[in-house]
Amino acid sequence: MEDKKEKEIENKVQSVSPEEHFEYTTKRELKRTMTFVLVVSIVFSTLLGGLLGYIASSSFVNNNSSGKTLSSITENVPSVNQQSAVISAVKKTNPAVVSIIASQYVSNNNSFNNIFNFLNNGGSNSSGGSNSSGGSLQEVAAGSGFIITSDGYILTNKHVVASKTYSYTVIMNNGVNYKATVVARDPTNDLAVVKINATNLPTLTLGNSSNLQLGSDVIAIGNALGQYQNTVDTGVISGLGRTVQAQNPETGAVENLTGMIQTDAEINPGNSGGPLLNLEGQVIGINTAIAQSAQGIGFAIPINQAKADVSSILKNNGKIIKPELGVTYEMVTPGIQKSKNLPYSYGAIIVKSGSNSGVLSNTPASRAGLKTGDVILEVNGVKVNNMNPLSYLIGEQQINSTITLKVYTKNKNVKNFSVTLNKVFS
């Protein structure tokens, strides 16, 4: 049928001119050529696709045979390194992190309200002891600490061991208990040192908190909720130079903690006094406070603020001896600057605190003539700000040394004051 039709067409072609015949023949050959090229292209594409598919599947099979998965292929290598660093730091430091338990004798017929009643969940609220009056020794508070010398000195927060009527027990990571004695409470910061009678103890290395960077990875270890000993949490440094107001549980007085490290590592009740570590396992801060109205906001005292205490304790038979200025103050904030109409956005303004006028009597500050409302701008040429709070700059000085304070006075004058520092004992 096809040949007959084609023959009829050829007969018609014979009756046309040579030019028309050439045009027809060319179109027919071109059509056949295009059809051939199309068929070859389809076959080649099919073969090439199959070959590439085989190569890709072979590659994936080989990857799987070496223990890799799709998630491991795309895994961020630095995160693996970070995890290894955290594990290594925790293994190295965990043995030197301790729990500190505060206990008090309570009458058996006393309806004592244990503010740390979460300890009851573990059945550890009572030690089972009793005194001659029939009372029992109950655990009333819990915190953390870390060993700084092999013969048993332990650094913690002052508010963990604030009461002078409680007895304190240190629980090691391996479960061994020691009776603890509070040897020093820092008079100007939320720091304290306790001592246990032991030798050859593991210790932590004190790092440097002056070169911290936002976003750096950190590790917090402590006695979470007073119940979960040596709980490990990780996070980053979220802020530096923060000022935190904290209430002393023993006196009720409000203390300004300045130069604090802010972190999103979980600092739960009971973590107070535990170490904030870098990935090398060095202590860069002492976990101290949490923002109760928010999650993921915790604060730690920079370790450099504690180094002077540690040095003093080792030199002075367990006593903290520090230089004293003799003022109560608040760091200048944008709000204070605006309300006081101050020309400076930094400094420490001397303020009243309760019955205290702001300048303690018979102190270097009172003898030098400082007044409430004065703003201390510099100490020996170093600006007073959140990174260098007044207490830290004074604590760095030598006892009985004479320093120069640059002050914006309440009379709106800038004046230099020469001050000779006293010593204050813990």
Image: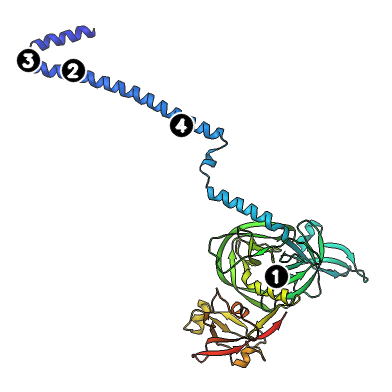
- Residue receiving disc 2: 28
User: What colouring method underlies this structural image?
Assistant: rainbow
Q: Earlier in the sequence, mark 4 or mark 3?
A: 3
Residue at the image position 85 percent from the left and 62 percent from the top: 127
Mark 2: secondary structure: helix
Which amino acid lies under the numbered mark 4 shown in the image of this protein?
Ala
What amino acid is labelled 2 in the image?
A: Arg
- Mark 2 burial class by Cα count in 10 Å: few <14, some 14-19, many 20+: few
* Residue contact between numbered discs 2 and 1, judged by CB atoms under 8 Å: no
Quadrant of the image occupied by residue 308? bottom right
Marked residue nearer the N-terminal end (3 or 1) = 3
Q: Nearer the viewer, mark 2 or mark 1?
A: 1
- Mark 3 or mark 1, which is nearer to you? 1
156 up-or-down from 69: above or below: below
Give the answer, above or below, for where 420 lies relative to 93: below
Mark-to-mark CA distance, 4 and 3: 57 Å
Where residue 11 sits: x, y (%)?
12, 8
Q: Earlier in the sequence, mark 4 or mark 1?
A: 4
Badge 1 is on which residue?
Answer: 157
Mark 3 lies on residue: 18
